Image (tube, rainbow, N blue to C red):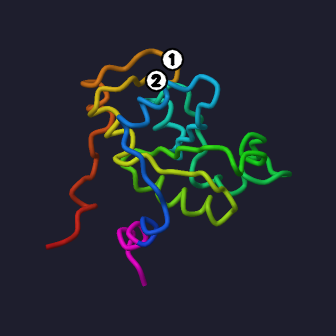
Amino acid sequence: MKTYDQLIAAALVRVKEEMPWDLAIRLKGRAAAVPLLIDVREPAEFNALRIPGSINVPRGILEQSTEWNYDETLPQLVTGREREIVLICRSGKRSILAADVMQQLGFTNVVSLRLGIRGWNDAELPLEDGSGRVIDADSGDVLLASRVNAEQLKPK
């Protein structure tokens, strides 16, 4: 049996990552060929804080979103197996697993945003909420803070 961190480590062998500041530079310089930014966090997380221009495809429906004939089908994914795609999550772990799955589904140009949206916020890159209101880095820190409570910690 593997742990979550072991699954991540195994996927990292197969998945490329991109640093937030490198992606920000690339996004500024490419109006015509902007990568598809897919945020795999849950809808409430996405609505609270997101990278402008990203779309929400939660991990729980990712595979169905890439195929025709499902309620979750997204035509830009079904037809975009060669398109450049950057996967985003809070810390960069869920997006690594999502990128690994997408590669298994035949996507050839998928990367995971290393450090996730937390790294994006730490670099003070632009963020917005669900209404498009700009979120400053300090507010982003609050929204992205860990909420692990005592009963979720490993016993000593």
Name the residue beneath numbered marker 2.
129
Density class for disc 2 (Cα within 10 Å; few <14, some 14-19, many ≥20) is: some
Q: CA distance from mark 1 to mark 2?
A: 5 Å
Name which residue type carries label 1: Gly
**Residue drawn where x is 27% and y is 52% of the image:** 148
Q: Position of residue 6 (x, y in %)?
A: 37, 73
Q: Quadrant of the C terminus?
A: bottom left
The location of residue 38, given as percent across then percent down, is 57, 41
Left or right: where does residue 131 sit relative to residue 17?
Answer: right
By secondary structure, the bulk of the magenta-drawn segment is best described as: helix
Q: Nearer the viewer, residue 87 or 13?
A: 13
Q: Give the labeled residue for mark 1.
A: 132
Could you tell whether 20 is left or right of 88 in the image?
Answer: left
Which residue range is magenta in the image?
Answer: 1-9
For the residue labelled by badge 1, is the local secondary structure a helix, a strand or a loop? loop
In this view, 55 is above or below 130: below
Q: Nearer the viewer, residue 116 or 23?
A: 23
Rendered residue at 41%/29% (across/down): 25
Q: Is residue 40 magenta?
A: no
Q: Quadrant of residue 144?
A: top left
Q: Residues within 10 Å of mark 1 (few under 14, many from 20)?
A: some
